[in-house]
Amino acid sequence: MDSINFSCQGESHIAAGKVCQDYSFSKVYENGNAIAIVCDGHGGKRYFRSDVGAKIAAEVTELKALEFVAAVGSILEGQPFTQESAISTQIDNHDFEKLSPIERAFRQLFSSIIFEWNTRVSAHVEATPIAEEEKPGLEERWITEFAEGHNLEKVYGCTLIAYVSTPTVWFAFQIGDGKCFALNSKGKWCEPIPWDDRCFLNKTTSICDSGAIDEFRYCYCGNGNSPVAIILGSDGIDDSFGSEVNQANFYVQILKSLVKEGLDKTIAEIETTLPQLSKIGSQDDMSIAMVFHLAEVERLYPTMIEWQIENVKGLIAEENTKIEKANNIQSSLEQVEHPTKQNMIDLQYANADEKRAIENRTKLQGRLDNLLKELNPENEVEPSDELTTNNEEPQQITDSSNDCNIEEIIENPVIDSEEVQSDKTDKEE
């Protein structure tokens, strides 16, 4: 088992002179345990020490998660894969006396993380009081709160995602945005931690919330079905891709690079690629942390290529549909004996749509040919032409693209410019 983690300053933060507010951590221990953590400090003015808060959250999470494993980790052994949403999104009158031993154990874990985080934040404030040079641009009510010693934890607010595994069990938990992707032994991708709909646009739950204990969601498994790879990413990565599929495909590229290029070169590529991705995408800070079984990733190498092939076929089918639609519009408009000005405009749009779809299809066919050659390097592959998807059972995350190395994703990103969001404030008042 191996691990990787990396955080980088976002393009907008570089331009504004703001520090990187993300923090990531990963480690594989001698006893076979492993951990990956990503924390994203909030970007709003009130959270001007969120970079410190993110680092503290990662340190506290490592400590408390390992204590949890040593003390009660055995209660997860033999358990099937289970997901639990945030308590605050469940029934209002939740009877905590009826919580199962596992639910109580996780609630105690989250409580201990929050308590230790607040303790260390308070110690940091006491050791380094808020200075005058930190106050410009802050609302007066916040400054008054600071002077009275109220809500100081808000200054350090951040989100948190963590994955922990032992030789027999694994679990993952989260508060706030960012995403966790898992690759299983059959080569299928999923998001194991339930999503929280309150994390939307520039809103997110946070470890600094007064009700944070009820905002954690989590998953666990002790039946031997551990992920082949699990990858945590901050929302700066999420917001740079138009869909979960493209993000999963980006992670496929990383895993393929690990097989082809090795650990050191892949880490170097990640360190080069994430800042470029920030520049053309969200412009936000970016963090990634992952734990993976390299031998299993290597075994799944052909399966990952097949997954990419089917996704590219799906995209080609979408372009074919667009071409057919444009052709139908063209045919109907060309039969109009006395076209109006609007008819002519609609015809121009149809012509442009057809041209764009043909260009996209040509690029996708090139990617498909490359993937087919990668899957069968010793066989000649006939160039593809207007391929469509088949009727096989869909993967849990589908419809991706890209097929070359990690850096090519930056050179030819599959990012819809209309879907890329700007650097967002992770939490507003």
Image (cartoon, grey):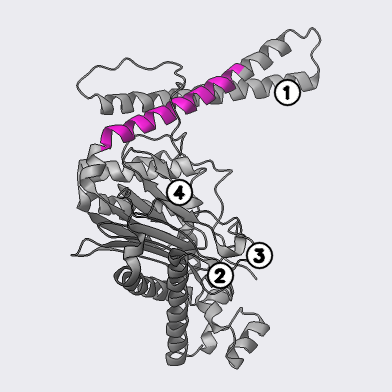
Residue 345 badge = 1
Residue 92 badge = 3
Residue 96 badge = 2
Q: Kindly indicate the quadrant of the structure image that contains residue 19.
A: bottom left
Tell me the crowding category of disc 3: few under 14, some 14 to 19, or many 20 or more residues within 10 angstroms, Cα based.
few
Residue type at tag 3: Asp
Q: Secondary structure at mark 1?
A: helix
Q: Circle 4 sits on which residue?
A: 191
What residue is at 34 percent from the left and 69 percent from the top? Answer: 72
Q: Is residue 209 magenta?
A: no
Q: Quadrant of the N terminus?
A: bottom left
Mark 2 or 4, closer to the camera: 2
- Total numbered badges shown on the rendered structure: 4
N-term-proximal mark, 2 vs 4: 2
Which region shows up in magenta? 300-324
- Residue 21 lies, in percent from the top left, at 45, 68
Farthest residue in the front direction? Answer: 98
Q: Are marks 3 and 4 in contact (CB under 8 Å)?
A: no
Res 20 seen here: no
Q: Is residue 316 magenta?
A: yes
Q: Quadrant of the C terminus?
A: bottom right
Vertical relation: 282 (above or below) 242: below
Q: Secondary structure at mark 2?
A: helix
Q: Kindly indicate the quadrant of the structure image that contains residue 47.
A: bottom right
Residue type at tag 4: Glu
What residue is at 28 percent from the left and 41 percent from the top? Answer: 256
Residue type at tag 2: Phe
Gap between marks 4 and 1, in whole Å?
Answer: 44 Å
